[in-house]
Image (cartoon, rainbow, N blue to C red):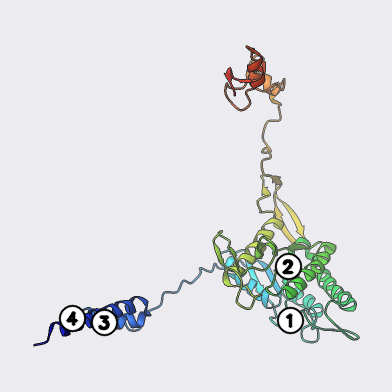
Amino acid sequence: MRSAPSRKLSEILIIGAVGVALGYAIAAPASAQGLLQRLFDPPVNTPAPAANQPRVVTIPVVAEKNEDAARLLVVGDFMARGVADALVDAFADEPSLIVVDRTNGSSGIVRDDFYDWNELLPEIIEETEPTYIVMMIGTNDRQTLRADGAFELRSADWDRVYGERVATLAEAMAPFGPNALWISQPPMRGRSMSGDMAYFNTVYEAAVDQYGLTFVDIWDAFADQDGRFTTTGPDVEGQVRLLRADDGFSFTRAGRTKVAFFVETEIDLVAGGGALFVQGPGAPRVEVLPGGVPRVVGPVLLLGAPPPDAPTQLLTEAPGLDEGGVAYRLFVLGEPPPAAPGRVDDFTWQEAPVADAAIARRGVIGGVEVP
């Protein structure tokens, strides 16, 4: 039989061991906690996952394209390729438009020895016969330019030759007018790279304005409140999402979808089906788009314009207008209707009788003294 001090020592050791185990269970990783759970809890039979369980994959519905569907040609580098993929998804259920991807991921405007866009773009346009063109390029252009010499990035000669090549590309797209869209570069993670992209955008926008194209400026859509690079931001549904990849320049799927949304919006506007205009009734007419593409349209009216069959008689000439009524005073005489007592436009307090100098100094609104 053990003595009392021995029993107390044993109890202390047991209590201490339990306390250590509980503390370890709280702070330990999941694997260790699972071990303690198996030691102290009874086993629970859980069903094993079914073997070869099929994975659910959502496949977008692709509409059968019309024979006379418009063709949207996407050209540029790897950034444009991502946008092309997003546009394919965006117009998957649109039978009247086909996206044609003719991008080259490693290409640029500088390395024309690798891929000469100035030479190949007119050939691609002639081959594909597009209705719309979308260009996004420049991310690969932060390097030495060789043309009758080696010109360092952003030097005077580099700027001159680069601007000439950009202008040549814009000139090749000029027959399409606003139907040719040039997407700007977004901000990049590195300050130096972001500054170069901002400079490239000024060159692109100048050429776009010169040749009457559409410039799609996405910089602010992928920048923080200070105009700098940010990895997250609102997606097309307003939810904050990861828009940029870990490399600091590529787009995530949500980012590509956002760029495609801006392209869709511009195409909708230049096609006359956007929020600014609607097609009204009337005899159809044939309109020739830039590039010689015909389109049958009706009269285009500003939203809010009266319908063509609306009466043109002025309200002041309408029969039965009571000369003593509120409508006559408002529309004919230009007098506002009387204000309701207590309403914000009720200024009758200014004409209210003043009882004494003290009230005059404080004022009365609607007969109620104001301190």
Q: For marks 2 and 3, give the one nearer the viewer.
A: 3
- Residue 237, above or below 65: above
Sequence order check: which comes first, mark 1 or mark 4?
A: 4
Res 47 seen here: no
| Residue, disc 2 | 184
Q: Quadrant of residue 4?
A: bottom left
| Tag 2 secondary structure | loop
Q: How many marks?
A: 4
Instruction: Choose the circle earlier in sequence order: 2 or 4.
Output: 4
Most extreme residue toward the left is: 1
Give the CA distance from mark 2 to mark 4.
79 Å
The residue beneath circle 4 is 8
**What numbered label is drawn on residue 107?**
1
Q: Nearer the viewer, mark 2 or mark 1?
A: 2
Q: Between tags 2 and 4, which lies in front?
A: 4
Disc 4 or disc 3, which is closer to the eye?
Answer: 4
Give the labeled residue for mark 3: 17
Label 3, label 1: how many angstroms apart (C-alpha)? 67 Å
Q: Position of residue 365 (x, y in %)?
A: 61, 21
Relative image position of residue 6 (x, y in whole percent):
16, 85
